[in-house]
């Protein structure tokens, strides 16, 4: 019987030959991810249900990556990390990436694949809604709550409902100035923030094939912004090369059937796409950037699991080289590896860091989630008052980056860079051609 890639991965995880949308099945989990916001709660559930002296089901399959509230004086944030540190020590967890040490990684959704924990065909559950990022590498990856995570921590299993699949077929060649963030914002704009509720969002087509792994991560990362259970892209040679460069652990890729039934199929010619923004206060408020050039800005922000990867900074640097920003422009690499790349990656003999400095951007912050989730008052990039911000992050809800009065426009790194130069929302194509 024909099945989608999501159905096949879940069937294998359940030890069944076939599963169908709506089935409730017990699955074996390959990786459980948590961080400093939800980790203490997950640990609390685990200890409550299994006992203070209980051992986790498999220490090698748990990754704890603190990332949200790292560089702050906030005592409660420090307490959370202490809780994780104590638990990791007691359980002898090999994959606790401790802030303040050489093992620190940065934002979990970029760090997890960097560290080789993401493999095609596997099941990845995380206590963060953007765990769906990892579907870009052909895995079933989704966010879960602390209660479910505490149960997984003790058993390695979870009861899930098999999602229906929405297939998005994207063909054609992306125009200059249009990138993955523009693709996913367009899709969310079309179907709405609830258009994929508890569905697998499967992305395919020649335009997806042409994207880099990090650009695919941008697309799957925001599946949750349409209500998706998971986002997923079938693995190809790019995927396999990336995985093999990160881990030597064995894995078996899974592929769906072309004739598998899906709930709905959406087809796009990406050659018609344009640079865009999502207006406050929903990711679905799509509008072409060129139609909002009257919007004056107070700050620009490049960072997060969505827009703080090395590819994102390269895009921004290519645009900013030889130009000057006119508003405060914050730079937050997602991970330590990305931060190192800002120094080692060059364009015409200049490192990315040198390009950003010459353009007048603020100093590069240490790798973390920083202001993407608001954070304590001393968080780098924390929005204040009624500032108008353009950002490469994934959510523009009220108060998301700090102030409840701030207005956040979501955009690609190119559009953010162009807008930082212009001082207002700008279509990067206008300056790319000048």
Image: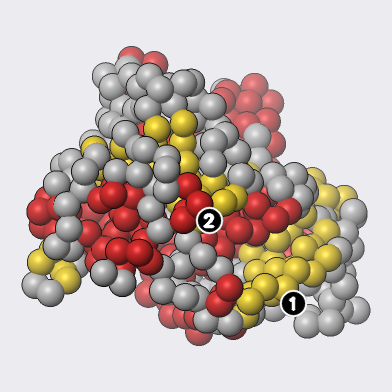
As drawn, 338 above or below 76: below
Give the residue at mark 2.
288
Please name whichever residue, 232 or 399, is drawn nearer the observer in this view of the structure.
Answer: 399
In which image quadrant can residue 236 be found?
A: bottom right
Which structural element holds mark 2? strand
Residue at 78% x, 82% y is 258
Give the residue at mark 1.
256
Which structural element holds mark 1? loop
As drawn, 380 above or below 60: above
Q: Position of residue 57 (x, y in %)?
A: 60, 45
Residue at 21% x, 43% y is 326
Q: Quadrant of the N terminus?
A: bottom right
Residue at 60% x, 39% y is 282
Q: Position of residue 160 (x, y in %)?
A: 79, 48
Tell me whether the residue at label 2 lies in contact with that at label 1, contact meaning CB atoms closer than 8 angstroms. no
Q: Position of residue 429 (x, y in %)?
A: 38, 66
Q: Is residue 183 visible?
A: yes
């Amino acid at each position: 019987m024909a099945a989608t890639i999501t159905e096949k991965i879940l069937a294998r995880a359940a030890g069944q030959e076939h599963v169908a949308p709506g089935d409730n099945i017990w699955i074996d989990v390959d990786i459980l991810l948590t961080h400093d916001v939800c980790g203490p709660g997950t640990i609390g559930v685990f200890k409550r249900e299994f006992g203070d002296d209980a051992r986790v089901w498999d220490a090698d399959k748990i990754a704890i990556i603190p990332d949200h509230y790292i560089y702050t004086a906030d005592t409660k944030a420090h307490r959370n990390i202490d809780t994780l540190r104590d638990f990791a020590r007691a359980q002898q967890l090999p994959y606790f990436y401790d802030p303040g040490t050489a093992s620190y990684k940065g934002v979990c959704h970029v760090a997890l694949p960097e560290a080789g924990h993401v493999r095609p065909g596997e099941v990845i559950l995380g206590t963060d809604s953007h765990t769906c990022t990892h579907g870009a590498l052909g895995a079933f990856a989704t966010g879960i709550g602390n209660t479910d995570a505490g149960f997984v921590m003790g058993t390695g299993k979870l009861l899930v409902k098999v999602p229906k699949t929405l297939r998005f077929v994207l063909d054609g060649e992306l125009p200059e100035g249009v990138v993955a963030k523009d693709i996913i914002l367009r899709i969310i704009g079309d179907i709405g923030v609830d258009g994929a509720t508890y569905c697998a969002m499967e992305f395919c087509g020649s335009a997806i094939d042409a994207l880099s792994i990090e650009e695919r991560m941008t697309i799957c990362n925001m599946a949750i912004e349409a209500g998706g259970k998971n986002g997923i892209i079938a693995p190809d040679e790019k995927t396999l090369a990336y995985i093999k460069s990160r881990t030597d652990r064995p894995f078996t890729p899974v592929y769906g059937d072309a004739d598998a039934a899906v709930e709905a199929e959406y087809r796009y010619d990406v050659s018609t796409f344009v640079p865009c923004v999502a207006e406050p206060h929903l990711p679905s408020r799509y509008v072409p950037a060129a139609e909002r050039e009257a919007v004056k800005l107070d700050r620009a922000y490049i960072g997060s699991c969505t827009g703080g990867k090395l590819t994102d900074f390269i895009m921004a640097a290519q645009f900013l080289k030889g130009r000057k920003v006119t508003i405060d422009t914050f730079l937050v690499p997602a991970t330590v590896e990305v931060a190192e790349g800002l120094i080692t990656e060059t364009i015409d003999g200049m490192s990315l860091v040198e390009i950003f400095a010459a353009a007048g951007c603020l100093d590069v912050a240490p790798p973390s989630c920083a202001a993407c989730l608001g954070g304590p008052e001393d968080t780098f990039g924390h929005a204040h008052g009624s500032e108008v911000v353009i950002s490469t992050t994934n959510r523009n809800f009220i108060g998301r980056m700090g102030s409840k009065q701030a207005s956040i426009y979501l955009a690609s790194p190119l559009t953010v860079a162009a807008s930082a130069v212009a001082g207002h929302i700008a279509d990067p194509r206008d300056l790319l051609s000048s």
